[in-house]
Image (tube, grey):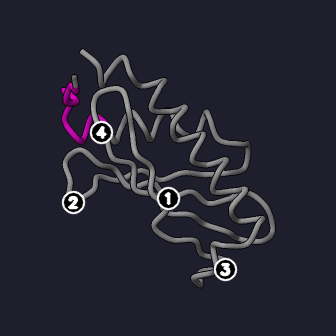
Amino acid sequence: MSSQINVDQTTLVNAWQERLPTILKPGDHAEVAADERDSNAIRIHIGAAGRQEYSFDFQCTYVDSREVRVDLVDVERDGATTDERSENIQGMVGDYTRHIHECAQALQQITHH
């Protein structure tokens, strides 16, 4: 049985913006924004630490109050779209996807009432 999230998008974005940086590696930075088209989704932009200037954009959609679906939207290097199929990038995407799921778990106290 699925249960909808019971929290407004602004509260959700603020909670993610506060929590996600504590889960990411030091030096990585995250920006969280509301998804304009889907009130059950947020957009996450992660700037990776390091000299390669990678940035990742994800859409994180609440399937229900406990589960999120994470979709990679774009990967950029030095501000230009790059091929996300390389092994290095796939590894980073996997790590960030795990971090996003971890953050969703940590925020269950606000999404699951």
Q: Which residue is mark 3?
A: 78
Label 3 and label 4: CA atoms lie apart by 33 Å
User: Quick one: label 4 or label 1, which is nearer the N terminus?
Assistant: 1
Question: In front of the other: label 4 or label 2?
Answer: 4
User: Quick one: label 3 or label 2, which is nearer the N terminus?
Assistant: 2
Q: Quadrant of residue 50?
A: bottom right
Name the side, left or right, on which 60 lies relative to 99. left
* Count of numbered circles in the view: 4
Question: In front of the other: label 4 or label 1?
Answer: 4
Magenta stretch holds residue 34: no
Label 1 and label 2: CA atoms lie apart by 15 Å
Query: Hey, what amino acid is under mark 4?
Result: Val
Magenta stretch holds residue 4: yes
Q: Residue at x 20, y 54 (%)?
A: 38
Region in magenta: 2-12
Q: Badge 4 local density, few (<14 within 10 Å), some, or many (20+)?
A: some
Per the rendering, the mark at residue 45 is 1
Labelled pair 3, 1 in contact (Cβ < 8 Å): no
Label 4 and label 1: CA atoms lie apart by 20 Å
Q: Is residue 52 above or below residue 14?
A: below
Please, what secondary structure does the residue beneath circle 3 have?
A: loop
Label 4 and label 2: CA atoms lie apart by 17 Å
Question: In front of the other: label 3 or label 4?
Answer: 4
Name the side, left or right, on which 10 lies relative to 109. left
Please, what secondary structure does the residue beneath circle 2 have?
A: loop
User: Quick one: label 3 or label 1, which is nearer the N terminus?
Assistant: 1
Q: Quadrant of residue 37?
A: bottom left
